[in-house]
Amino acid sequence: KQEVTQIPAALSVPEGENLVLNCSFTDSAIYNLQWFRQDPGKGLTSLLLIQSSQREQTSGRLNASLDKSSGRSTLYIAASQPGDSATYLCAVCVRGSTLGRLYFGRGTQLTVWP
Amino acid sequence: ETGVTQSPTHLIKTRGQQVTLRCSSQSGHNTVSWYQQALGQGPQFIFQYYREEENGRGNFPPRFSGLQFPNYSSELNVNALELDDSALYLCASSLEGAQDTQYFGPGTRLTVL
């Protein structure tokens, strides 16, 4: 069974810092890995999707890397802003399971203060 | 904007009651998955429907059931509600042949008293 772990569980930083959020997964047979953002009480916003054949994806100040063999992904946020405050979820889509089924971590709750 | 809508936004029920949650997807999205997200947890897979048939289920009891309709809408039904069913319920849809890319709705917040 796929287990997804996210570290740290919570992070509080001043504006302007560069951040690293970590995600690890136990089964490396994945189709892809996705990072989501979730604002309090809201649904999920997809940030970056990395296919299993890729090593990284970038969107603006966000960069996500994937090391499938070691079961790790990192989300890097450059020059953090108060508007980045949210919970960040990592999810993997696993081969051999119901196609499209996502296994989520518990998230990293990020607070960026001015 | 994902094009996936859910109703209602919030719902309060009492223990033992039944509830129906609804999801409307974009045209052509014939796969829909439902997730339960308890407070402070990541979403957990309930089940998936493909072309109106259940196509996989997570570790949820039979009192969680679903329906998918030809117009790309779907329902999640929960019978005999328990306090632990209080959660945010998310639906996610995807296109034929692209099930590894899912579009999430905003969720329904269910509170069971």
Image (spheres, grey):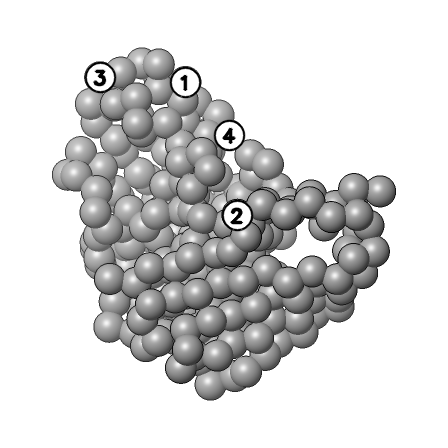
Can you tell which quarter of the image residue B55 is in? bottom left
Q: Which disc, if any, is residue A54?
A: none
Element type where label 2 sits in the image: loop
**Residue that numbered label 4 is attached to:** B9
Amino acid type at mark 4: Thr
Q: Nearer the viewer, residue B45 or A23?
A: A23
**Residue that numbered label 3 is attached to:** B16
Q: How far across and down, in percent of the image, does residue A80 sit?
A: 77, 55
**Residue that numbered label 2 is attached to:** A9
Nearer-N-terminus badge (3/4): 4
Crowding near pointer 1: few (<14 within 10 Å), some, many (20+)? few
Per the model, the C-alpha gap separating discs 3 and 2 is 34 Å
Amino acid type at mark 3: Gly
In the image, residue B81 sits, relative to residue B22, either above or below, namely above
Instruction: Give the residue at the far bottom of this rendering.
Output: A53
Amino acid type at mark 1: Ile
Q: Residue at x 58, y 45 (%)?
A: A10
Same subunit, tags 1 and 2: no
- Eye-nearest disc, 3 or 2: 2
- Eye-nearest disc, 1 or 2: 2
